[in-house]
Amino acid sequence: MSRIGRQPVKIPSGVKVTNDGKLLKIEGTKGKAEHVINNKFDYKIENNELNVVPRVNVEKDKAANAQFGTERAVIANKVKGVNEGYVKTLLLKGVGYRAQMQGTKITMAMGFSHPVVFEIPAGVKAEVTENQTKITVTGIDKQMVGETAAKLRKVKPPEPYQGKGIMYDDERVRRKAGKSAAGAKGK
């Protein structure tokens, strides 16, 4: 049995969780989220805590055992998202690298022969700040925020020789020595 799955999800004040039989509806200060109920689990809400309880014996049902901790973690992420929200910050490093917001699109100059246009999906907000070199992605769905940030980073991932590209705010790029430094000891 999963140790994570057995832990209760704490429901903070200002967050309302309701179970209508098919959906868990989670409402908070940042917005609303829904979670489709898995028929292998019961969801018990009492004393500002939500417990995920397996209906089947998880020792015998491998699929339920695999989903037990994941089910609890996804619900906990949604509760945190509607209460606090999620933020991913990306930095554009390189000469002439910049971004601009145009409605729901981000137009980026990344050293290509053309500007790169990126459409921000619904449910996620983006903001360009600090001399057009910092992109902040926010939202209530952890997966959507992370996925959007990863797709933005994929436009021009950081490269190890010059350290240029799009990187997460807390990411450290391991630098490599170039050819001249590596081959200086040679012939």
Image (spheres, rainbow, N blue to C red):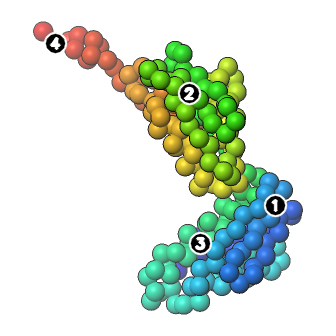
Q: Earlier in the sequence, mark 2 or mark 1?
A: 1
Based on the displayed image, in which of its 4 quarters is residue 136 positioned? top right
**Residue mark closest to the camera, 3 vs 1:** 1
The three-letter amino acid code for the residue at tag 3 is Glu
Question: How far apart, in angstroms, are the residues tagged by discs 3 and 2?
Answer: 37 Å
Residue sitting at x 44%, y 20%: 113
Kindly identify the residue that appears in the image at 48 percent across and 75 percent down: 66
Q: Secondary structure at mark 1?
A: loop
Is any atom of residue 119 visible in this view? yes
Location of residue 123 in the rendering, given as x and y in whole percent from the top left corner: 68, 52
First along the sequence among labels 2 and 4: 2
Q: Dot 3: within a 10 Å radius of its alpha carbon, few (fewer than 14), some, or many (20 or more) residues?
A: some
* Vertical arrangement, residue 167 with respect to residue 12, above or below: above
Q: Nearer the viewer, mark 3 or mark 2?
A: 2
Q: Which residue is mark 1?
A: 28
Nearest the camera: 135 or 3?
Answer: 135
Q: Nearer the viewer, mark 2 or mark 4?
A: 2
Image location of residue 8, percent across then percent down: 70, 73
Crowding at mark 2 (Cα within 10 Å: few <14, some 14-19, many 20+): many
Q: Label 4 belongs to which residue?
A: 186
Please tell me whether mark 2 sits on a helix, a strand or a loop.
strand
Amino acid at pointer 4: Gly
Could you tell me how far apart the alpha carbons at marks 4 and 3 are, in whole angstroms?
57 Å
Q: Quadrant of the rendered structure where residue 118 is? A: top right
Residue 71 numbered mark, or none: 3
The answer to whether marks 3 and 1 mark residues whose Cβ atoms lie closer than 8 Å is no
Nearer the observer: mark 1 or 4; the answer is 1
